[in-house]
Every structure is written in structure tokens, then in C-alpha cells.
């Protein structure tokens, strides 16, 4: 399997519900990031959590990181139809530059 | 405050032709990254460049693919003698100078160039 695998591959929920996506990775990391991609568009950075952090919040987003299990989760609370997109986790090894390794993504569909 | 600019957005080539994809990073960014995305898949790293230097090309196919980031002008990803398997979306991303990159870790992406090989 690849560095950075998201689970589930696809998720369909009703507007107002919470959406939880998980990401597992294999190697040591400096940071883990979540990105969003609308269909046919580029990726947009959502949130970054460093390896020495366990939880981070940004608006309706909550990210957790468990380095002992090499896993992270992204929670979107009170989802909206506009949250419909693909969500990718990406790991950075640190050092010079920002080379990121992306996961396979979770396709989230929020229905009215 | 322009973001990362990629062109063309869509490119159609016949097998055996050459494809050139261009990327202008955000103002003040000196690091450029190219990624490839196949349909329904995540992004695969191809190459990381700074001005006039290739830093990491571990994701580049050994043949037909090349990248450059000259002192002046955009970064270019060049695919020679394209084959149907090269059909994909190619994304460029940029980040600030090394010191800034270590502080933020974030990549800024363009809208991608979608290559279709007939």
C-alpha cells in the first residue's frame, strides 16, 4: 500500500452531519496536511499539523494526529453541500523544500 | 495577487507528439513541484526544482520526461513522444524559499493542465 491512504474511499452524508476521514502513512513525518480538491480543479490547502502536535482546529475542521499509529483523521462538522469534494492527506518529511506524498483521497458527497 | 498559473489548461496531442506544460509560481516563490494525477487517483510526485536546479527528480519517468525552471520565465514540464498512458492532469505547486517552507510546509497549487493523448 502507499504512503498516505485515506479511508473511506467514498463517503456520502446528509447536510448538517459530521464527516470523518482517516489517513494512514508508513514513514516518519515532519508534518501532515489535508487538502481539498473540487472536481476538475487544483488542490487547496486546508490544515497542517506538525509531528509534535496531537490535535488542531480550523473553523469547522478538526485534525488529529497519532504518530504511534501513523494515522490522522479529519473531521468536518456540520457539513454543507459546498463541502462536496475529494479530500487528500499529504505527508511531509521535512528538510529543505516541501516535497509532499499524497494519499489516494476520500470522495465526500454532502446531500441536501 | 496571482496564484500559481498553469497553461495550457487543456492540451490534446496525438501519439508521438511533444507536450509542453508551463507553470509560473506565486510571486516570491522559488520552489516548484510537479505532480501527476490519473483519473480517480491521488497525486504522484514527479519533480522538485528551484531556479536553474533540479533538486529531486525521483518521480520522473526515466525516458521522455524532462523539467526545467530557468532563471527567467516559467517552469516547463516537457513530455516527448507522448503515449496514451501519459493522459493525465499535471499539477504544479510552489512554495516560498527554503526558510519559509520549513515554517509553513504548505504547497500552493495551480489549476492543472489536462493532457489528452489520442
Image: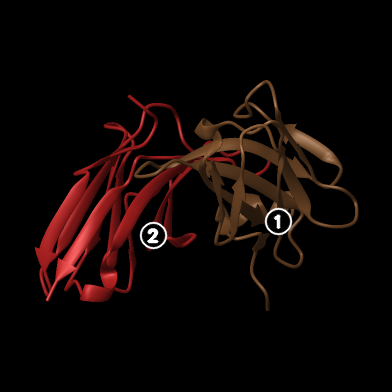
Chain colours: A red, B brown
Q: Which mark is residue B23?
A: 1
Question: Does the image show residue A35?
Answer: yes
In the depicted structure, whether residue B3 falls above or below residue A26 = below
Image check: A56 left or right of B3? left
Q: Which residue is drawn at 67% across and 60% down?
A: B7
The quadrant of the picture occupied by the C terminus of chain A is: bottom left
In the structure shown, which secondary structural element does the residue marked by tag 2 occupy?
strand
Q: Which residue lies furthest to the right in this view?
A: B71
The nearer-to-camera label among 2 and 1 is: 1
Residue A7 in picture, x, y percent from top left: 22, 42
In the depicted structure, whether residue B63 falls above or below residue A34 = above
Question: Does the image show residue A98?
Answer: no
| Camera-nearest residue between A44 and B88 | B88
Q: Residue at x 46, y 36 (%)?
A: A29
- State the CA–CA distance, disc 2 to disc 1: 21 Å
Image check: A36 left or right of B82? left
Q: Name the residue under label 2.
A: A36
Amino acid at each position: 500500500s502507499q504512503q498516505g491512504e485515506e479511508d473511506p474511499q467514498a463517503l456520502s452524508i446528509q447536510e448538517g452531519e459530521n464527516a470523518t476521514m482517516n489517513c494512514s502513512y508508513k514513514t516518519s513525518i515532519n508534518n501532515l496536511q489535508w487538502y481539498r480538491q473540487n472536481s476538475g480543479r487544483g488542490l487547496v490547502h486546508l490544515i497542517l499539523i506538525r509531528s509534535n502536535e496531537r490535535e488542531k482546529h480550523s473553523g469547522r475542521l478538526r485534525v488529529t494526529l497519532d504518530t504511534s499509529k501513523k494515522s490522522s483523521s479529519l473531521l468536518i462538522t456540520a457539513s454543507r453541500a459546498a463541502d462536496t469534494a475529494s479530500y487528500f492527506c499529504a505527508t511531509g518529511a521535512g528538510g529543505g523544500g516541501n516535497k509532499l506524498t499524497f494519499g489516494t483521497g476520500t470522495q465526500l458527497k454532502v446531500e441536501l | 495577487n496571482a496564484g500559481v498559473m498553469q497553461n495550457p489548461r487543456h492540451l490534446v496531442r496525438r501519439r508521438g507528439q511533444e507536450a509542453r506544460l508551463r507553470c509560473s509560481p506565486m510571486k516570491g516563490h522559488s520552489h516548484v513541484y510537479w505532480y501527476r494525477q490519473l483519473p480517480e487517483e491521488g497525486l504522484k510526485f514527479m519533480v522538485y526544482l528551484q531556479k536553474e536546479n533540479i533538486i529531486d527528480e525521483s518521480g520522473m519517468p526515466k525516458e521522455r520526461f524532462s523539467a526545467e525552471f530557468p532563471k527567467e520565465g516559467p517552469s516547463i514540464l516537457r513530455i516527448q513522444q507522448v503515449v496514451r498512458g501519459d493522459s493525465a492532469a499535471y499539477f504544479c505547486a510552489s512554495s516560498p524559499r527554503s526558510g519559509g517552507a520549513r515554517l509553513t510546509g504548505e504547497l500552493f497549487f495551480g489549476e492543472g493542465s489536462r493532457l489528452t493523448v489520442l
